Amino acid sequence: MGTSQGCRQRVSRQPTHNWSREAALRLKAWRRKLEREREARRDVKAPTFQDAVVRWGKEVLPGAAKPAVGARYLSSIGQLDPMFGTLRMEQISPERDLTSPAT
């Protein structure tokens, strides 16, 4: 008997690189790095609301909005100062009672 034409032998190739394993290793390393950074920051106090607004106004706002828009943003944010001004950023949450001033 001869060989039948049209029948091809399937070749199962092993991938030369295991992408999912590499991705899992990268993810694990990234999580370890984030955890180390979080541990390093635990001793550092979070900035106050006022400090964060000043920094945002100097570093982010100039490149993010036109001067008139930036002034309007700062005016609006300034209205939050009585509630949040001296609070540390970690103390501010959606659950915070907005009827009482910052303490």
Image (spheres, rainbow, N blue to C red):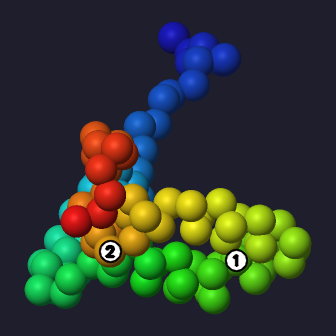
Question: Which circle's residue, 2 or 1, is located before the other in the chain?
Answer: 1
85 or 57: nearer the viewer: 85
Mark 1 neighbour density, 10 Å: few (under 14) some (14–19) many (20 or more)? some
The residue that mark 2 highlights is 86
Which residue in the structure is indicated by mark 1? Answer: 61
| 3 sits left or right of 75 in the view | left
The image quarter containing residue 57 is: bottom right
Q: How far from the left and from the top, in percent, is residue 64?
A: 76, 72
Given residues 87 and 3, the one toward you in this image is: 87
Mark 2, residues whose alpha carbon is within 10 Å: few (<14), some, or many (≥20)? some
**Which secondary structure, mark 2?**
loop
| Picture layout, residue 53 above or below residue 72 | below
Amino acid at pointer 1: Leu
**Is 18 above or below relative to 29?**
above
Residue 86 in the image: state x and y as whole percent: 32, 74
Q: Secondary structure at mark 1?
A: helix
Q: Is residue 37 visible?
A: yes
Structural distance between the alpha carbons of marks 2 and 1: 21 Å
| Residue at x-position 77% and y-position 80% | 63
